[in-house]
Structures are given as C-alpha cells and as structure tokens.
Image (cartoon, rainbow, N blue to C red):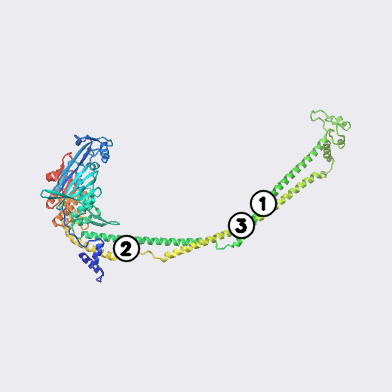
C-alpha cells in the first residue's frame, strides 16, 4: 500500500460526506499504476555533467586567394568528392560560416580549391570557460555547436560549408564519476560512431562500447545513456489531442541560454516551462504530479470527444428528423395537386377506338376530296375553254357581217379608188369591186361577197355567220349555248360534291377531335392515378421514417471514462498538488532570493523583489514598480534567465537535491544590449558562483577582453583581432 493511495482513499471518503466508500488502497494503487502514475516520489539528487576534452578535425576547401590557403595543394572542384562538390561549387570559401571571413556572394563558377586540413583540441575546465574573438563570425559558435552535437545527438545549425568541413569529432564527458567518450565521423552533418566508457586503472585505460549509432539514431542513443546516468525522469504532458513525453531533447536544450531565445524563463520549451522548473528544483513528487495531470487531461479529452460525438449524433438525428418531416410534407403536397377522379377504362378504350375509326374515315374522305377537287378544276378549265370558243365564233360572225357588208372606196393595199361603177357592176360582172376576183354567185345571192376560189365549207360558214345580220335572234344558235350550259352544269356538280365532302370531313374531324380529347383526359387521369399510387408508397415510407425518428430519443453520451478511475486520478492530482506545493514553496523563496542577488550582480541593480511562483512565472519590481518577466527588455530578460538557471544549479548543490547537472552554455550574451563593463561584471559574478557551487559554464562572446582579464589561460579560447578561434 502506497502513501499516495492511502491519501487518495481518505480524500474520496471525505468527498462522500463521511459515508462508506467501497474502494481500498490496493485498488487505488492498481488504478494509478494502470494510468501510468507512479506510486512513490523519487529523491532527486543532482549528477554533475562536465566536458573534459573536445577535439574535431576535417578539411577546409578554400579559394586560392584565401589567407589560409597559402602553401596548400590546389584541387579542381571536379575532382572533389561528390557529396561536398555542390557545397564548394556554390559557396565561396571566403563566406563566413561559423567563423571564416565576411559573408560573400554566391560563387557559381567551378575552379581550383585549396585543400586545408585542420584540427582543434581543447580541454575545458570546471567553472567558467570562455570562448571569444575580436570580431563576429570567427568560429565561436562552431565550438559550442560541436559540444552540443556530441551531447544531444542532434546536428546543430552549422553553416553549410563548416558542416561539410567537419569530418571527425571526439568529446569526453564526465557524468558523475563516469567518463564517457562520444566519437564519430561525419559526412555533411550525418554522424556515425559510438559512445564508449573509459575506465582507468593504475596506468591502464580500458574502454567499453555503450552504444553505436549511424545517422538518425544518434539522438536516441545519447538520450538513453544520459537520462539514466543523470537521473532525469521523463516529463509527461498532455497536448491538444494526445499525451506526449518530453525527455532528453527538452532537458539538453535547457542547458543552453541564447540571447535570441529567452522565453520561457526555465528551459527553451514554452509548453513545459513549469515541468522543467519542477524537475530542476527537485521536489520528490513533481514527476508523479505531472503523470497524474497528464492522465486526468487524457480522461477529460476522452470525455469531451464523447460529448462532441454524441452532440454530433444528436444534431444528425435532428437534421434527419427535419428532412423526414419535409419529405412527408412534400409528398402530401404533390398528392394534393393530383386530380381525385378515377378514369373509366372502358370509356377511354371506346373513345380511343372511335377516334381511330374516325381518323381512318377522315383519311378516306380527304382522298376523295382531293380527287373531286381535281375533277372540279378540270370542269372549270373545260367551261373556260367552251366559253372562249363560243366567244371566238361570235366575234368571227360579227367580223364577217362587218367586213362582208363593207363597201370600201379605196383599195386597202394600193389606195386606188374603188369607183361606184365598179361596185355597181359586181352583181352583173360577178367580180369583186376591190380585187376583181370572180365571186361565188350562190353566196352573192345571200349577200355574202366571197371569191369563187374559196372552199365550199368555208363559204357555207361565212354565209351562216353573216345571215344573222338580217335581224335573226342569236339565241336560235342552240349548239354553242348548250355546250356552255353543259360545262357550267358539270362545274356546279363538281363543286357541290367538293362542298359536300368538305362538310362531311369537318364533321368527322370534330367528332374525331372530341374522341381524342376524351382519350387524352382519360390518359391524364390514368397517369395521375399511377403517380398517386407511387406517391402514396413514398408517403408511407416517409411517414415510417419520420415515426422512427420521432420515437427514437437523442443519442445518449456514452462516458468512455470509468468514473471511479476519474475520481481516483482527480483525488491523486489534488493530493500531489498540495504535496509539491508544500515541498516547493520554501525552496522557491530561497531560489527567488538567489535570482535577485545574481541578477543584480550581473549589473541589473534596478531589478528587485523577485518572486518565482510555482507556475514558473516571475514577478519583480523594476525601479520599485511592479513588473513581470515578460515585460522586461531583452537585455534584462537575458540577465534574469541566466540568474535563474544558475540559482537552480546552486540550489541543487547547496541542498543536495534537484536534477540540474550543473552544465550551462551561454551563447553570445553581449548581443543583447550588454556593454563590455556589464559583461565583465557578469563573468566575474559567474566565476564567483562557480567557485561556490560545482558547475561548468561556457560563455561565448565577441567581447573577448573580459575573458582574457578574468579567466585563466586553460579556461579560455580567445582569438584576438581578425584571428579565428580554430
């Protein structure tokens, strides 16, 4: 039975107003263990971490005119290894990366390069170690990057050329009393090597391989080796959707303070600043509290997800219900628009038969009408011809009468005079008074003047046509008149037949259209009846769906969390919060005082009244006015962040508790509004603190003078003027 389990049982019992609770301490322990919550706190004892030796080597590929290229063999870019050729091809060797000259333009032209081998070796000391140069970009950051590369297993952000230059790295670390060497070969930032433990006995040194890596597994190897040796525990946290465990990358990143990364106040991971502070302070129950809070947040997330799912399901049911209601209403509306009558199929069939018969009859009559119309046209043409012929005969008779009774006085051709004597001699001489032709005596008796040479049938016609001029009735000529009347009678009969057929067709057409209309109405009613049956089936289905949705209740929320488990973990979180606070608050008072003292010793004497809270928030006074860490300037934040890191290290050293290994890297602190005298004050204060507490601090800065003045030769690597650090 655990102490935590006992306290949880008591808390649960009090929540039940003193009533009995059917859960035991063993059951609580089992629940907590199942949720990943440790049952006991762990004593945090700091394990020192120190870098004792640093070595790296490789090859620089420099342009021939570079100062460091003199005396070295030239190699054409085409002859370089393939993996380095693009880097050399596209970057001038004079480009400043982590420390070799001013930045230059891209050099796209291939050409010879000087092959300049290099190596660097240094043995950092306990306390404060300085890395400085007279100018920026002289290789200071490269040393820190190589150091952290070997510690974290993650390649830092080298410049491309420097990353490609480094070919071999060896860094010796002292972890507590154990000596480890991290050695690896690198190809353009990809490391392959091993971690060995070096044991010295008398004058002999033996080594044991602890882990090997090749590329991406470097970080995992370092994490597994360092977490256990430094007695660091995983930091579980709950993100938006899942639990996440922070381990070696989060811890190792907190060992570095950079001027461009000042939030949060502890470490460099904003989401775990609180947890990182608790781990470094060293309260026994801090890791357990983190695990309990993570478990509870996981349950809350599961509950919220279940509620959201149920709500979404309820909204889906309601949407389906509304859709079903609309569908029922739409179908009813469609049914209401249909005619209510039911068609008489026999009447519809009779009407269809009648319409078909009438259509055939109309077709036959139309054929007769076409033929009769043609006959009427022919009769009219014949009547017209008879009339024309009769008219011509009548005109001929009139002309004959006219011309044969003429007594011309002049020849119509030669204009010679026709004398009266010649005209009077016609009956006696039997000659035409105009042309002197012999006359037909028989015709002359009828007063028809015609030459004897004219055929008899023509003479008879002329006599007949001219005889009417003597006052006889024209109606006596029955022949022509009978022919016209007969033609007119034929036309009238034909037109009467056409009219009769037209009237009969019109009557039958009307009857046919009426029958067809009755068929169309019946068909429409039949179609409507069929549609009604389909819609009535649709209505039945829609009403059934609506009835099912109406009877069903909204989906209930199924709680995915065991309420007993939730009650246990909430009670555990409450207990652990109190225990951590009770252990932590007195420590925070002392740590806050140390932060104030250190910050003021770094030159920020306008800041006072520091109070580091259990939530990893900082309040203070700036010139007597209330202020927070987030409201400080970048330079003030830098001083306070460094002071906080050192105060945590001091706390672990003095109290013998905590988890900070006492290893700290300060990268370019003078970059944030820190004049040289303030940097000197900080270095002096750091040196004094390192003398009081066991720690190793690396300071990289462009202001090299304070390092030279305040640090021993063995504790510094300084390049003065335009020189390079390596």
* Drawn side of residue 430 relative to residue 589, left or right: right
Q: Is residue 721 above or below residue 10?
A: above
The residue tagged with tag 1: helix, strand or loop? helix
Task: Determine the CA span between mark 2 and mark 3.
Answer: 72 Å
Closest to the observer, 347 or 383: 347
Q: Of 164 and 391, which appears nearest the observer?
A: 164
Q: Residues within 10 Å of mark 3 (few under 14, many from 20)?
A: many
Image side of residue 337 versus residue 575, left or right: right
> For mark 1, what is the residue?
366
Quadrant location, the C terminus? top left
Identify the image quadrant of residue 624.
Answer: bottom left
The nearer-to-camera label among 2 and 1 is 2
Within 10 Å of disc 2 (Cα), the crowding (few <14, some 14-19, many 20+) is some
Q: Quadrant of residue 75?
A: top left
Tell me the residue at 82%/32% (across/down): 408
Which callout, 2 or 3, points at the residue further toward the start of the chain? 3
Measured along the vertical axis of the image, is residue 498 above or below residue 518?
above
Q: Which residue is mark 2?
A: 560
- Residue 640 visible, this angle: yes
Residue 516 is tagged as: 3
Is residue 674 visible from the viewing direction of this image?
no
Q: CA distance from mark 2 to mark 1?
A: 88 Å
Specify which label sits upstream in the sequence, 1 or 3: 1
Residue 24 percent across, percent down from the top left: 24, 68
Rendered location of residue 34, percent (x, y): 26, 62
Q: Quadrant of the N terminus?
A: bottom left
């Amino acid at each position: 039975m655990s102490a935590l389990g006992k306290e949880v049982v008591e808390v649960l019992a009090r929540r039940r107003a003193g009533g009995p609770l059917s859960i035991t301490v063993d059951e609580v322990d089992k629940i907590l263990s199942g949720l990943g919550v440790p049952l006991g706190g762990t004593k945090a004892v700091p394990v020192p971490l120190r870098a004792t030796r640093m070595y790296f080597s490789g090859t620089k590929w420099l342009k021939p005119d570079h100062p460091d290229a003199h005396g070295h063999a030239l190699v054409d870019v085409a002859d370089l290894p393939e993996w380095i050729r693009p880097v050399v091809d596209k970057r001038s060797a004079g480009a400043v990366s982590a420390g070799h000259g001013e930045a230059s333009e891209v050099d796209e032209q291939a050409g010879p390069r000087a092959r300049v081998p290099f190596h660097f070796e240094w043995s950092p000391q306990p306390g404060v170690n300085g890395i400085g140069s007279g100018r920026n970009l002289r290789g200071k950051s490269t040393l820190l990057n190589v150091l952290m590369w070997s510690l974290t297993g993650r390649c830092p952000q080298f410049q491309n050329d420097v990353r490609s230059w480094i070919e071999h790295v060896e860094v010796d670390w002292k972890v507590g009393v154990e000596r480890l060497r991290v050695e690896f070969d690198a190809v353009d930032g990809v490391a392959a090597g091993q971690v060995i433990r070096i044991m010295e006995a008398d004058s002999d040194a033996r080594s044991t391989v602890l882990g090997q890596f090749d590329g991406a597994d470097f970080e995992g190897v370092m994490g597994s080796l360092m977490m256990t040796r430094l007695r660091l525990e995983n930091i579980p946290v709950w993100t938006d959707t899942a639990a996440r465990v922070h381990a070696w990358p989060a811890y190792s990143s907190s060992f570095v303070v950079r001027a461009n990364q000042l939030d949060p106040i502890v470490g460099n991971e904003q989401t775990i600043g609180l947890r990182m502070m608790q781990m470094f302070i060293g309260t026994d129950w801090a890791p357990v509290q983190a695990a309990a809070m993570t478990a509870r947040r996981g349950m809350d997330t599961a509950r919220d997800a279940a509620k959201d799912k149920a709500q979404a399901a309820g909204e889906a049911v309601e949407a389906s219900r509304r859709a079903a209601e609309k569908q029922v209403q739409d179908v009813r509306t469609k049914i209401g628009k249909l005619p209510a009558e039911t068609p008489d199929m026999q009447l519809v069939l009779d009407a269809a038969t009648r319409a078909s018969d009438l259509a055939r009859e109309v077709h036959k009559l139309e054929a007769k009408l076409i033929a009769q119309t043609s006959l009427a046209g022919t009769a009219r043409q014949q009547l017209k011809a008879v009339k024309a012929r009769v008219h011509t005969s009548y005109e001929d008779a009139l002309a004959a009468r006219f011309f044969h009774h003429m007594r011309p006085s002049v020849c119509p051709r030669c204009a010679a005079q026709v004398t009266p004597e010649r005209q009077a001699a016609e009956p006696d001489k039997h000659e035409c008074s105009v042309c002197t032709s012999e006359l037909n005596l028989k015709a002359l008796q009828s007063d028809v003047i015609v030459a004897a040479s004219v055929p008899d049938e023509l003479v008879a016609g002329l006599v007949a046509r001219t005889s009417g001029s003597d006052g006889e009735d024209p109606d006596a000529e029955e022949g022509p008149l009978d022919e016209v009347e007969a033609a007119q009678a034929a036309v009238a009969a034909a037109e009467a037949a056409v009219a009769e057929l037209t009237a009969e067709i019109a009557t039958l057409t009307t009857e046919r259209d009426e029958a067809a209309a009755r068929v169309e109405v019946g068909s429409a009613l039949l179609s409507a009846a069929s549609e009604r049956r389909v819609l009535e089936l649709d209505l039945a289905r829609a009403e059934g769906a609506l009835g099912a949705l109406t009877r069903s209740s909204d989906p209930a929320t199924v709680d995915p969390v065991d309420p007993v488990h939730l009650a246990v973990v909430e009670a555990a979180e409450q207990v652990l919060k109190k225990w951590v606070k009770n252990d932590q608050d007195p420590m925070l008072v002392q740590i806050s005082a140390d932060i104030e003292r250190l910050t003021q010793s770094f030159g920020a004497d306008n800041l006072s009244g520091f109070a580091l809270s259990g939530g990893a928030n900082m309040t203070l006074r700036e010139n007597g006015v209330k202020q927070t860490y987030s409201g400080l300037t970048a330079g003030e934040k830098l001083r306070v962040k460094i002071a906080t890191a050192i105060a945590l290290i001091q706390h672990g050293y003095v109290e013998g508790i905590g988890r900070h290994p006492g290893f700290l890297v300060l990268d370019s602190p003078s970059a944030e509004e820190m004049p040289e005298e303030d940097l000197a004050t900080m270095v002096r204060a750091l040196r004094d603190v390192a003398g009081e507490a066991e720690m190793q601090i690396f300071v990289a800065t462009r202001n090299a003078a304070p390092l030279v003045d305040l640090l021993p030769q063995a504790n510094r690597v300084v390049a003065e003027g335009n020189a390079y650090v390596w």
